């Protein structure tokens, strides 16, 4: 029996709308770290990532604290390397940016959702210097702390 072909350019509808963080993270204001970054912004990001999707359910293995912590731990590792060998920051930057691909892979495996992927992408895209790596690491640390509270697991 021949397989039925879909019309060219036709894609099946996604069963659920792609979740995003819902806001742009303001890392800096007037060239300085945004005053609310490690408090209000990190808390709101944690709240959104922890939010249960429509229907009141989320995949059992999605956005587990241990999974999210792995991304933070890797960022901390690169932060430590950059502090020990600041002259190597440019060499480390592609590997830091690879965290976006790792988060996309985890989303594809339904270990994280689109809101977390969006947060990781915004955070990694912000990093272009050792100083910004410091800020991104501290933001992620604050996010992890608030996430534990918001998720309640």
Image: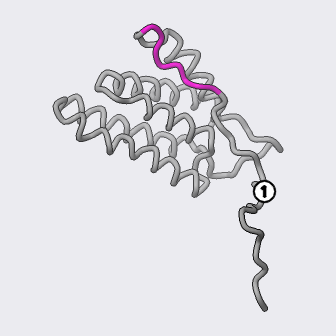
Image x and y of residue 22, in percent: 66, 30
Dot 1, crowdedness within 10 Å: few (<14), some or many (≥20)? few
Image x and y of residue 17, in percent: 75, 45
The residue sitting at 65% across, 37% down in the picture is: 20
Q: Which quadrant would the C terminus be assigned to in this image?
A: top right
Instruction: Give the number of marks.
Output: 1
Between residue 46 and residue 92, name the one nearer to us: 92
Q: Residue 77, located in which quarter of the rendered image?
A: top left
In magenta stretch: residue 9 = no
In magenta stretch: residue 28 = yes
Q: Going by the picture, which residue comes out furthest to the right?
A: 55
The residue sitting at 45% across, 7% down in the picture is: 30
The prevailing secondary structure element of the residues shown in magenta is: loop
The residue sitting at 38% across, 30% down in the picture is: 127
Applied colour scheme: one colour
Q: Going by the picture, which residue comes out furthest to the bottom?
A: 1
The reply, left or right, for residue 94 in relation to residue 145 is: left
Q: Which quadrant would the N terminus be assigned to in this image?
A: bottom right
Residue 152 higher or lower than 135, as above or below: below
Q: Secondary structure at mark 1?
A: loop
Asked whether residue 152 appears in the rendered view, the answer is no
The residue range painted magenta reads 23-30
The reply, left or right, for residue 36 in relation to residue 21 is: left
Asked whether residue 24 appears in the rendered view, the answer is yes
Image x and y of residue 54, in percent: 80, 41
Q: Residue 14, located in which quarter of the rendered image?
A: bottom right
The reply, left or right, for residue 23 in relation to residue 9 is: left
Between residue 138 and residue 151, name the one nearer to us: 138
């Amino acid at each position: 029996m021949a397989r039925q072909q879909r019309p060219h350019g036709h894609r099946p509808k996604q069963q659920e709308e792609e979740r995003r963080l819902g806001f742009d993270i303001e890392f800096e204001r007037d060239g300085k770290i945004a005053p609310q970054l490690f408090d209000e912004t990190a808390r709101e990001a944690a709240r959104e990532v922890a939010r249960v999707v429509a229907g009141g359910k989320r995949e059992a293995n999605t956005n587990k604290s241990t999974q999210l912590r792995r991304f933070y731990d890797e960022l901390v590792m690169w932060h430590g390397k950059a502090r020990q060998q600041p002259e190597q920051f440019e060499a480390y930057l592609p590997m830091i940016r690879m965290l976006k691909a790792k988060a996309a892979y985890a989303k594809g495996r339904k270990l994280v959702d689109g809101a977390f992927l969006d947060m990781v992408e915004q955070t990694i895209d912000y990093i272009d210097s050792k100083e910004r790596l410091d800020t991104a690491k501290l933001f992620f640390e604050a996010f992890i702390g608030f996430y534990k509270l918001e998720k309640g697991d």
